[in-house]
Amino acid sequence: MMRTDRRSETVSTLIEGLYRSRFRAFLGVAAAITRDGDVAYDVVQDAFAQALRSRATFRGEGSVEAWLWRIVLNRARDEIRNRKVRPLPKPAEPAMLSRPTVVSETVTERITDLTVRRLIARLSERQRLIVFLRYYADLEYAAIAALLEISPGTVAASLSSAHARIRNELKEIAR
Amino acid sequence: MTDVPVELRMELDGLVEPALATHRPDWADVVSRVQRQRPSRKSVFLIAATVAAIVSGSALALGPDLWQAIRGTSIDDRVLSERDLRALRTVSSGRPVGISKTERRQLRARAGRIVSIQLVGTRFGRSLYLLTVINEDGERVACQASGPAEATDRFGFIRCSAPDAPAFPSPERPVLDQSVIEVSREDASPHVVRLEGLAADAVKSVALTEETGSILARTPVIDNVYVRTTGLPRGPVSRIVALDQRGETIWTMRVTRGG
């Protein structure tokens, strides 16, 4: 019992430490998935509360951070599933431009926020998750692979494919 | 991280920038949510109100026209357990607050003689209150008020129910909504500018839906308070709905022109 209590205390300390050091990463990924800042904040807060409450069930398989990411991702996906419909914003008129974005080394073009968001939305759910976990959480391929239960090779291929697709479609729009 | 194209980085940053700018880590809030997620509660306040229909509220005009939600319907064909009924009749959060003589005088002019004021909760800088007042007819009525938490004018908004309105909180009235709804001359459809109100313990989230029932935006109820000012749909809203912990609708209110 004492050993279990000590381990539980250690896990609790690790959870708090990860919360303080990686809050922005968790919030960023949750916000990208749910497309709603307030909901994302609640996803993160509730996920850490859930982890804290059930820390005794953490069996030490994998890292505490991986365990937390699983809880956050599951909660974020539940939020999406619980919404009946969440329509994407209508595309802006081509003339409605936003801040400048470099498309290639030689072409500078203005692309609307909504265009890139729509391109991201067109990726498969797994590709989107991989992009978000790589960018906002800066997770290594192996960590992403473990989270999504795929191989690191699949992570690399998915990421490369997603980037290529978005880059190509941005170039098409820029023409 | 060189594998993310530079043209994508700015857009990915923009995707979550509002969330990162608005929200800060709050470990104390995480710990309090652990308590809230527990099935049993250590202390409970029962707030009884004796009022019925909503009367027209105070000045909230943000546009040339003002929509007021005037009707709410509870889902009364469900079989509710004793536990569900208890949660629909309870607001666990809140504490009495004092008011200055000036505030008492101002509130008397707007609502009536103040019997009690309870601060239910504060969220995103807005505090929401429940009041009991004696109106000019000598009737005891329940009122709701809200305003910026750190302001000299704490009760910018105040609205009182009619004496014969269903009590809050109750299965008939688990929500006291005070959302700000706007309609303009150019567009007669109602738009929610601020989603805000008080809810019984049984209500876990409040959502805006379109006519088909599709959810347009949702916000959780924390400490019996819901507030949302960002990410609200730009298009017209048909209903405000209250959802329980299973995501089922337990109360719905059509957003229509009031008066």
Image: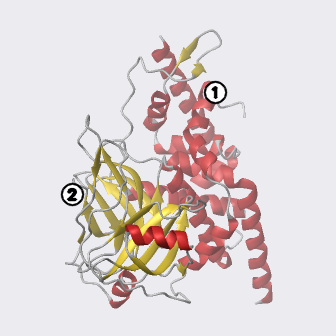
Q: Which three-letter amino acid code belongs to the residue tagged 1?
A: Pro
> Which quadrant of the rendered structure holds the N terminus of chain B?
top right
Check disc 1 and report the residue beneath it: B5
Please tell me which residue is depicted at 26% across the width and 75% down the height of the picture. B162
- Discs 2/1, front: 2
Can residue A98 be seen from the camera position used here? yes
Q: Is residue B123 left or right of residue A82?
A: right
Q: Nearer the viewer, residue B50 or B223?
A: B50
Output the chain of dot 1.
B
Q: Residue A143: x, y in percent?
A: 68, 51
Output the chain of dot 2.
B
Q: Residue B3: x, y in percent?
A: 68, 31
Check disc 2 and report the residue beneath it: B259
Circles 2 and 1 on the same chain: yes
Can residue B204 be seen from the camera position used here? no
Q: Residue B224: x, y in percent?
A: 46, 73
Q: Is residue A170 above or below residue B42?
A: above
